[in-house]
Image: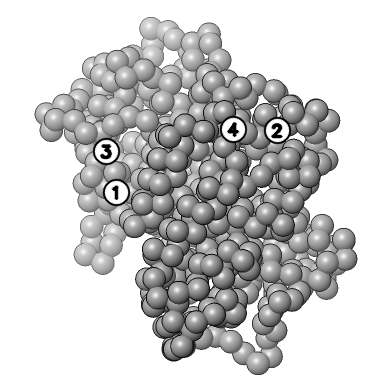
């Protein structure tokens, strides 16, 4: 995760481009009509889409290229029922006052379709299936069709074929989107650079020494440092680091895993922002877990108001802590939607759903079947739950991770769940560890910081072949080696290991 991101970041200077240059000709002189901006959740795709609209409206970009630009929110498009029909003309004039001159205005706009720009934000949020017959397209901007047909026709240049598109999406939906497009040009939004992450830390901390200490620590943790490209995650990590320093904690002697950071942040919110009774808070958290898990299985990040209420989440003062609320107008009605403040929090609560001791709502065979299916899906590595797997194992440490929740609500880790995950790890690893294949598994074991669990998981390992490319990978290896009781052969490869003697490498107290 971290090394791959560093490789991408290292090339960003030589391959980066500006918003103004998105539609520039390529080396063959071809000018793209379809631009895809991909990026992780929270990286700033919507902000960039709206900035493009603003800059165009402010006459800063694309003045000679586009006479009209239209912003289409895929979240809002979801409000159209599968059978409900509309037209491109209605979509672009949705917010206009209805009068008899509107049709004439739209006709004039559509005359020069090569001067039209459609900014379609959040393709990954669309609930529609685009699996439809090849002849199910619309070529008339005035004809009313279901939204999925209109969007598919726009993507594949069947309707307004000379217009240009900018589409934003998360990486998990790229394959689905690619099947809908012809000759797209792809760009990746990478978020904060290394320098920008450092600047963020120094701006956040009032004390320069604290900023230096926190940044150096986080920089050594590939997972944390990679996630800091996202502004919200940078804020969360800085907030937790600052709280820990104020409590007198020594960052160098404590292994702050991703789970530990999120659990500390979660616990502080429960402590300082809630005055409800413990049963009410417990019910709300379990409802969040249930909603998150359902979304993971459906690959859904946007929830309608009725879906949130179905999970008994209707306390207005509680929802804003973990869910963003959006309100859309539709005729005279107001429609509310919700999404977790960041995808990683949806994965956090979904993972918590699996490891807690089963209650009445979870004790059925379906729950166990879902966990088994989730682990089996790791073979193809679910991108929509990549961070969730780390949380899943991180929660297994009852003493360090779940102590606060156990104290507050009496929550326990299900022994059956822990045994289930232990058996899964043993089956994955066997006796010989090849780092390329078991890299993620070792990272999960490090995430637990549970010595007994890791001892059991690695008791049969006799050989390790490990390629070390970063400080974090070395820390993972050092931690896991301590628990390989029957290790006979260890081979470490380090072709590009960036360690320097002048840098401090932090291990936990047990090391």
Relative to 359, is 62 on the left or the right? left
Helix, strand or loop at disc 1? helix
Residue at image coords 36%, 17% = 81
Asked whether disc 4 touches disc 3, contact meaning CB atoms under 8 Å apart, the reply is no
Relative to 267, is 89 on the left or the right? left
Asked whether disc 3 touches disc 1, contact meaning CB atoms under 8 Å apart, the reply is no
Disc 4 to disc 2, how far (Cα)? Answer: 12 Å
Mark 1 or mark 4, which is nearer to you?
A: 4
First of labels 3, 1 by sequence position: 3
First of labels 1, 2 by sequence position: 1
Residue 290: percent from the left, percent from the top? 55, 33
Helix, strand or loop at disc 4? loop
Q: Residues within 10 Å of mark 3 (few under 14, many from 20)?
A: many
Where residue 103 sits, quadrant-wise, is top left
Q: Nearer the viewer, residue 58 or 467?
A: 467
Helix, strand or loop at disc 3? helix
To which residue does mark 4 refer? 359
First of labels 4, 3 by sequence position: 3
Residue 487: percent from the left, percent from the top? 49, 84
Quadrant showing the C terminus: bottom right
To which residue does mark 3 refer? 155
Residue 282 numbered mark, or none: 2
């Amino acid at each position: 995760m971290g090394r791959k991101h560093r490789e991408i970041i290292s090339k960003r200077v030589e391959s980066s481009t500006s918003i103004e240059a998105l539609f520039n000709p390529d080396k063959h002189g071809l000018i793209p009509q379809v631009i895809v901006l991909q990026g992780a959740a929270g990286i700033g795709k919507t902000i960039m889409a709206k900035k493009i609209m603003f800059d165009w409206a402010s006459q800063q970009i694309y003045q000679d290229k586009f006479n009209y630009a239209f912003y289409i929110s895929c979240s809002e498009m979801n409000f159209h029922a599968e059978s409900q029909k509309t037209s491109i003309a209605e979509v672009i004039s949705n917010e206009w006052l209805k009068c008899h001159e509107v049709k004439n205005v739209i006709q004039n706009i559509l005359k020069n379709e090569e001067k039209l720009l459609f900014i379609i934000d959040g393709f990954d949020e669309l609930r529609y299936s685009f699996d439809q017959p090849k002849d199910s397209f619309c070529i008339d901007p005035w004809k009313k069709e279901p939204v999925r047909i209109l969007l598919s026709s726009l993507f594949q240049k069947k309707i307004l074929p000379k217009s240009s598109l900018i589409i934003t999406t998360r990486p998990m939906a790229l394959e689905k989107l690619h099947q809908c497009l012809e000759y797209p040009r792809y760009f990746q939004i990478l978020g904060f650079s290394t320098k920008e992450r450092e600047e963020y830390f120094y701006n956040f901390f009032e004390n320069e020494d604290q900023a230096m200490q926190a940044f150096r620590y986080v920089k050594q943790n590939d997972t944390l440092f990679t996630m800091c490209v996202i502004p919200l995650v940078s804020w969360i990590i800085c907030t937790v680091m600052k709280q820990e320093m104020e409590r007198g904690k020594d960052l160098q002697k404590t292994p702050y895993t991703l789970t530990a950071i999120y659990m500390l942040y979660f616990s502080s919110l429960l402590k300082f922002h809630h005055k409800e009774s413990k049963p009410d808070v417990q019910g709300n958290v379990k409802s969040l877990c249930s909603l998150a898990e359902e979304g993971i299985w459906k690959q859904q990040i946007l929830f309608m108001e009725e879906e949130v209420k179905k999970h008994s989440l209707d306390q207005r003062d509680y929802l804003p802590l973990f869910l963003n609320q959006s309100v859309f107008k539709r005729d005279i009605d107001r429609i509310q939607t919700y999404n977790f403040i960041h995808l990683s929090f949806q994965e956090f609560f979904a993972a918590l759903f699996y490891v807690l001791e089963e209650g009445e709502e979870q004790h059925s065979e379906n729950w166990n079947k879902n966990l088994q299916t989730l682990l089996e899906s790791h073979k193809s590595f679910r991108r929509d739950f990549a961070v969730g797997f780390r949380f899943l194992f991180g929660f297994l440490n009852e003493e360090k991770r779940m102590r606060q929740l156990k104290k507050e609500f009496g929550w326990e880790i299900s022994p059956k769940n822990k045994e289930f995950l232990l058996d899964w790890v043993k089956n994955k690893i066997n006796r010989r560890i090849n780092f390329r294949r078991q890299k993620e598994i070792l990272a999960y074991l490090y995430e637990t910081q549970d010595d007994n669990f890791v001892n059991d998981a690695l008791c049969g390992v006799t050989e390790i072949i490990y390629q070390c490319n970063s400080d974090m990978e070395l820390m993972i290896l050092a931690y896991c080696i301590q628990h390989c009781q029957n290790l006979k052969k260890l081979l470490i490869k380090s072709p590009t290991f960036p360690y320097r003697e002048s840098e401090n490498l932090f291990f936990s107290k047990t090391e």
